[in-house]
Image: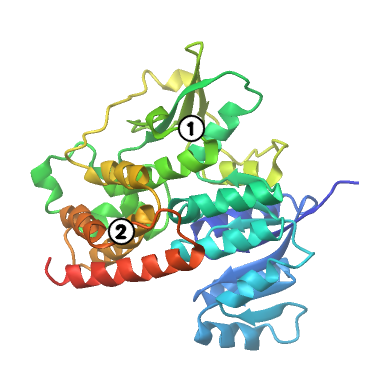
Amino acid sequence: MTFQKRIAILGSTGSIGVQALEVIRKYPGLFKVQILTARRSSGLLIRQALEFLPQAVVVTDRNAWMEVRDTLKGTPVKVLYGNGSITEVLAWDSVDMVLNALVGFIGLEPSLAALKNRKTLALANKESLVTGGHLVMREAAARNVSILPVDSEHSAVFQCLRGEQATIEKIILTASGGPFFKYSLKALESITKSQALDHPTWNMGEKVTVDSATLMNKGLEVIEAFWLFGQPLSKIEVMIHPQSLIHSMVQFSDGTIKAQMGYPDMRLPILYALSFPRRLDFPEARRMDLSHFCSMEFHSLPADKFPCLEMAYEALKKGGNIPCVLNAANEVAVDAFLNERLNFTAIPGLISRTLEKIPLIKDPTFDQLKDTHREAQRMAQILLTSC
């Protein structure tokens, strides 16, 4: 009999959550949706709940929770309210795996709760490792629990490392360069919201799409890779690869480079994490015809146009709570840009000024990280008024 993995999807109404359910829909005998969580998207969550009939749904916005509760009355689905309920359901014996697809610092506490309760963690919430990587990896090691990367780049590295015994010389994370890789510094000054959200290859949520345009997303992924793969920062590089066909590479001590390739499709790394250690069939994915590609481009990063990546490297070198400051300031800056309160080119400046205001804590606890996040966001909001 095939073991059916019982899965909690945190952020089921977001881009990753929706695509995860699309994958699960193809394999009803292998996966059972046990928990769904959402903040405000009550209509979509209700449709998901009625289709998959999970044991429970958790809603963190009160008005949305009341709508979901009333609509699902009479069904076997429990409807719970609040962030505290997320950590509560992750302790249930009926959950085997947690797919954390939340966006932002809010995802750190559920990641720690999943590991504490010995649930395999399929991690799409990059902020868990960016802000609290030392806590996450410490908890995973203490409980002997696997963390399976869902980001396409980290999934690619993970796949390249399988079965390898050789020394890693470097990890090469590829970046599409976003929509503005070839723009001049002058042209970047007039970027609009709609331009920034028009990503050339990936379909993602608004915040991640803007991060991709500033290359902060790649900086956050460098920090993720540092924690996931245990390599020094000097061995983690970023290269621009506009076609997004090679999702990342690993160079080994004999000079060999292994690359994981495929058309951009987030369902594939999601499926790989959910089904690991198996690689399941997925005929819906577009196949690569290599004869169609005369060349694939690789470029060094133009740091002068995209300072966010270098800020991420520097934040990780300082360590402690400083990556948490970086992330918090970036959340404020991106939100301000999306609400047309901050120019695109002013995003890194706001982050940099915030980093200067928050003192270093070398080995922060979770509570200290919460305080750091709150204080960094407060400081960024103050500094935003002078931009």
Counting other residues with Cα less than 10 Å from the Cα at mark 2, is it few (<14), some (14-19), or many (20 or more)? Answer: many
Residue designated by label 2: 330
Q: Is residue 11 visible?
A: no
**Residue 286 in which image quadrant:** top right
Q: Residue at x 41, y 28 (%)?
A: 235
Image-based side of 380 in relation to 168, left or right = left
Q: Residue at x 18, y 41 (%)?
A: 305
For label 2, the SS is: helix
Outermost residue toward the left? 186
Q: Nearer the viewer, residue 38 or 158?
A: 158
User: Measured from the top left, where is residue 355 in percent x and y?
Assistant: 26, 57
Counting other residues with Cα less than 10 Å from the Cα at mark 1, is it few (<14), some (14-19), or many (20 or more)? Answer: some
For label 1, the SS is: loop
Name the image colouring.
rainbow
User: Measured from the top left, where is residue 291 in percent x and y?
Assistant: 46, 18
Q: Nearer the viewer, residue 361 or 44?
A: 361
User: Measured from the top left, where is residue 42 in percent x and y?
Assistant: 54, 77
Q: Earlier in the sequence, mark 2 or mark 1?
A: 1
Q: Which mark is residue 231?
A: 1
Q: Nearer the viewer, residue 18 or 85?
A: 85
Quarter of the image for the C terminus: give it: bottom left
Question: What's under tag 2, amino acid-wise?
Answer: Asn
- Report the label total: 2
Q: Which mark is residue 201?
A: none
Question: What's under tag 1, amino acid-wise?
Answer: Gln
12 is higher (above) or lower (below) than 226: below
